[in-house]
Image: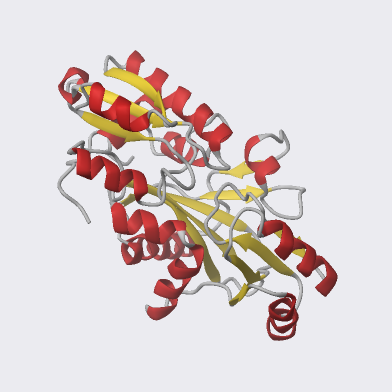
Amino acid sequence: MINLHSTRDPGSFGRVAVLFGGKSAEREVSLKSGAAVLAALQEAGVDAFGIDAGDDLLQRLSSERIDRAFIVLHGRGGEDGSMQGLLECAGIPYTGSGILASALAMDKLRTKQVWQSLGLPTPRHAVLASEADCEAAAETLGFPLIVKPAHEGSSIGMAKVGDLAALIDAWRAAGTYDAQVLVEQWIQGPEFTVAVLHGQVLPPIGLGTPHSFYDYDAKYLASDTQYRIPCGLDSVREQELKVLSARACEAVGIRGWARVDVMQDADGNFWLLEVNTVPGMTDHSLVPMAARAAGLDFRQLVLSILDDDLEARS
C-alpha cells in the first residue's frame, strides 16, 4: 500500500478556497469536481469555501481571507498556468503544478515536442491550419487519425477519422475550440491512465469503451465504460508503464498530482498521449479510482493533494 495519507490536522491548512467552474469548455466537469472536493474538505474539518472563477474572481481573491487555494479548474483559465500566475502574484499558495508545467502540459503539441526531445514515445503528429495541411497529414500519417484541439481537455473537440473528407470536417470542428489543431497517428490497442501523486505512481487503470475512443461521453456520462484495476498487464509491463508515466511527468515539470494517458499498440509498445495537471474529480473520474486502489478514499485523496509543501515554484 502506498503511504500518502496526510498526517496534518485539517485545521492547520487555514482557510482554503476551492477554485472551480470558470469559463472554459470544461466548466460543467469542473463544477462537479469542485463540488466533490469542497464537500470532502469540509467533511474532513477543513475551513474550505468555494469560488466559481467568474468575472468577479479578482475581487473575491482580494476580499476573502485565503491561506491556500485548491485548484479544480479544468482547461484554459485554470489548468494552463494563468491561474497559477495570478495566485503567485497574489501571494496565495496553491495545489498542483506551477506556471511553466501547467502551461506546457495544457499545450499538447509542445508537450509532445518535449517528450520527443527526450526520446519518450509519443504518436507521430502534424499541425493543421488548412485543407492542404489535412491532405499532407493524410499522406504522411495515413488513416485512421485522431484530431484534437491543442489546448482542450476532457476529449472536447476530438474526433477519430478514416478518410480525407472526415479529416477536413474534424479539423474545422476542432478549430471552433482552438486556433491550433493537432492530428495524431491512431494507435490501435488498449488505453491506460496513470495517476501520479507527490512523485508516487498509483496503480494504472486499463480503460475499455464500446465508443470509437475514450471520448467525453465515455468519460463522464456513459455507464458502459470499463475500468480495469489491476490494469491487465503482467508485472513487468505494468512497471514499464509506471516508469514511463513518471518520466513523462518529470519531463514536463509536474508536481503535486497529475494523470498521464497512454496507449499500447499491437506490438506491446507504449505511447504517451498527454498529461493532465488538474484531472477530473467527479464520480466518473480516474484519479479517485486509482487512489482507492492505493488505499486512499476520496477524503484522504483531497487532503493528500492539499498537503503539499507549497514552496515557490516555476
Q: The N terminus is located in which quarter? A: top left
Residue at 73% across, 37% down: 224
Residue at 52% across, 52% down: 193
Q: The C terminus is located in which quarter? A: bottom left
Task: Give the vertical position of 100 relative to 207 (above or below).
Answer: below
Q: Position of residue 164 (x, y in %)?
A: 81, 74
Q: Position of residue 156 (x, y in %)?
A: 63, 49
Q: Is residue 235 visible?
A: no
Q: Is residue 164 visible?
A: yes
Q: How many numbered marks have been drawn onto this rendered protein structure?
A: 0
Q: Quadrant of residue 43?
A: top left
The answer to whether 45 appears left or right of 233 in the picture is left
In depth, the one of 125 and 304 nearer the eye is: 125
Residue at 68% across, 69% down: 186
Q: Position of residue 97 (x, y in %)?
A: 31, 50
In depth, the one of 96 and 56 nearer the eye is: 56
Residue at 67% across, 58% down: 174
Task: Give the vertical position of 311 relative to 29 (above or below).
Answer: below
Q: Quadrant of residue 16?
A: top left
Q: Position of residue 167 (x, y in %)?
A: 77, 68
